[in-house]
Amino acid sequence: MKKGQSRLERWRTLPSRTWRRWVSLMDVREDGVSLALVRIAVAVVLLTDQLIAGRLGLIENLWGPHTQGGLALAADQQPMPLMFEVFGAEAATAHILWWLMVGGCVALALGVFSRIAAAVVVFASAQEAMIFPIGDRGIDIALRAICLILVFSRSGSTLSVEGFVRRGKLHTGDLIPAWPRYFCVLQICWIYFSAGFHKRGDWWPWQGSSALWRILHDPHFARFDLAGWEWTYPLTQLGTLGTMFFELTPPIFILALYYRRFPQRAGRIGGFLNRMRFRDLWLTLGVTFHVGLIFTMRLGIFPLGVLAIYPAFFFPDEVLGFARKVRSKLPFGKKKKAEPAPA
């Protein structure tokens, strides 16, 4: 409280002060490298998913009309998905849609007309969801939302073809609005928190903490047969408790992220979170969680899709600092010592 300012006056000016801080936060400019990594990683994950569907010969089955071997009844909907309206409810339309999605992902990953490419990916993904709704997984919805954020961002300003053409180098150093990265962070934190908040039943900590044990013994999801591994049950209980802690603490993580960015505003709570490195601990737990999913369960692109958004959690100067450290360890990245001048 400012000297001479009453508590009533403090409350009266709270809305205007909050609005000024919000505007100031949304007006922050930063290097675009973190958001560029999100753009590249998300595009690569979505592209891989499409290429797998193509390799397995599932294009017509997933996105073709039921009259020509498709699994969905979208051809009977009124109105029909736009792709069926324009190109007709035919098997060939499924291939056009697939190529549209693949082309959009490639352009987005390379940074060729990044905003247009992100819009194409959003459109193609939404059309795939309309044609075959039960195939539209939660991770598809999440990555579609991230791509929609990228439409309104300048994620193609660096680590992109368009940036290289404009500046003559991959890392351009251009400063871009930081708010799209903030929204990516909010998106993934909301996914975690809502998942933890809606967990019910006797599988979770409230009654036994057996959720991880049960799913690791479900042949539909588990990669390995764990029969005879009963001694690991307490470890899976600990894993279940850790999962719940991780999924219910994103509000604290967002505070830690904010105070890491603005340590001058930390106060006691922010100072405590910074000293205990809560942000780093939370992210380590998240990476461990998803890497564990990759190696123990068959969940499609879900763990990789979520990890693709993780670069948004890191400030650009941290990413660039890490890149410099890695480069300095590589043989071609070390600077040669200057030769002594001849006597």
Image (spheres, rainbow, N blue to C red):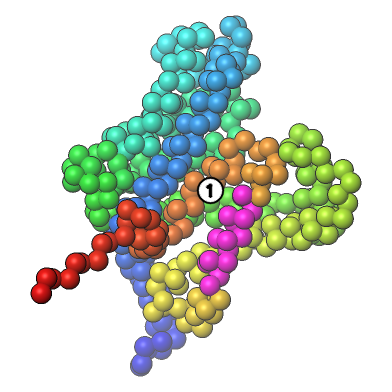
Q: Please give the name of the residue rendered at 29% of the width and 34% of the height, measured from the top-left corner.
A: 112
Q: Please give the name of the residue rendered at 55% of the width and 70% of the height, measured from the top-left corner.
A: 278
> Does residue 190 lie above or below 219 as drawn?
below
Could you tell me which secondary element the residue under label 1 belongs to? Answer: helix
Residue 11 appears in which quarter of the rendering? Answer: bottom left
Q: Please give the name of the residue rendered at 54% of the width and 42% of the height, measured from the top-left corner.
A: 305
User: Magenta span: helix, strand or loop, mainly?
Assistant: helix
> Quarter of the image containing the N terminus?
bottom left
Q: What stretch is highlighted in magenta?
A: 277-291
Q: Is residue 286 magenta?
A: yes
Q: Please give the name of the residue rendered at 40% of the width and 48% of the height, measured from the top-left corner.
A: 37
In front of the other: 309 or 203:
309
Q: Position of residue 240 (x, y in %)?
A: 75, 56
Residue 73 appears in which quarter of the rendering? Answer: top right
Q: Is residue 6 left or right of residue 165?
A: right
Say which residue label 1 marks: 307
**How many discs appear?**
1
Q: Does the magenta stretch include residue 47?
A: no
